[in-house]
Image (spheres, rainbow, N blue to C red):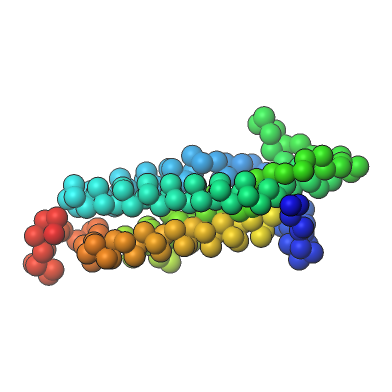
Amino acid sequence: MPFATPAWDLALFNALHFGLRGTVLDVLMPLVSSPLLLWAVVGGGLVLGLRHVSWQRRAVVLIALLATLGLTDGGTNIVKHSVGRVRPLNALAGVHYHEDGAWQQRPADYVQTKERGNSYPSAHAASSMAVACLLAFFWPRVRRSIWLLPLVVGFSRVYLAKHYPLDVGMGWLFGIGAALATCAVLLALGHGASVGADPSHDETSPEDGAAPGA
């Protein structure tokens, strides 16, 4: 069944996609939207945050991240195929899109030819939000700034005409749900306090009285 785009969704897309265009964003947004950014953030965060924790705790963090990303990727793909919403770049005239390393634009008389697509929801938005939630859970010190990651990634998807704002918003909600499910499992297994501790504290500190890997 075709996905009918709400008027507010199209209006917000036009405001973000056309209204905020600029040379700087044209350079940055393809980079921000690359999966390499997400993995760079995850990798950098793990290298810095796991330096002073036991191998058991490192395993918990890695398994939680991989499980959550698998859940978001698999879950969003199921919904994508079920809904079949066509991406803006394949549905709207005049939109700008980045392909083969260069910016291109649909002609003013462009007419949608695809009947189905995979726009809803945004897997990029879901994954970036899930990662942000887990990093905030494991390392409370980043809670004030980590949300910039899903915000910028989500905007990049609209800027690149890969998604409508509604796709991004539902992706964020999907990522939050996946992260909450993972955190609930961690807490149920008794890993919340130890894994969520500030990584700058030595795990043998007398302040917590815990043995390494407890």
Q: Is residue 197 left or right of residue 80?
A: left
Q: Is residue 39 left or right of residue 154?
A: left
Q: How many marks?
A: 0
Q: Residue furthest top?
A: 100
Quarter of the figure with the C terminus: bottom left
Position above or below: 156 against 11: above
List x then y, in percent, for residue 32.
56, 46
Q: Residue at x 68, y 48 (%)?
A: 84
List x then y, in percent, for residue 158.
67, 52
Q: Quadrant of residue 47?
A: top left
List x then y, in percent, for residue 106.
82, 40
Q: Residue at x 61, y 57 (%)?
A: 168
Q: Is residue 91 left or right of residue 101?
A: right
Position above or below: 211 against 156: below
The one of 105 and 184 positioned closer to us in this rendering: 184
Q: Is residue 62 left or right of residue 102?
A: left
Q: Quadrant of residue 138?
A: bottom left
Residue 156 can be seen, yes or no: no
Q: Residue at x 49, y 43 (%)?
A: 37
The one of 69 and 28 positioned closer to us in this rendering: 69
List x then y, in percent, for residue 203.
15, 59
Residue 174 can be seen, yes or no: yes
Q: Residue furthest bottom?
A: 207
Q: Residue furthest right?
A: 109
Q: Residue at x 77, y 40 (%)?
A: 114
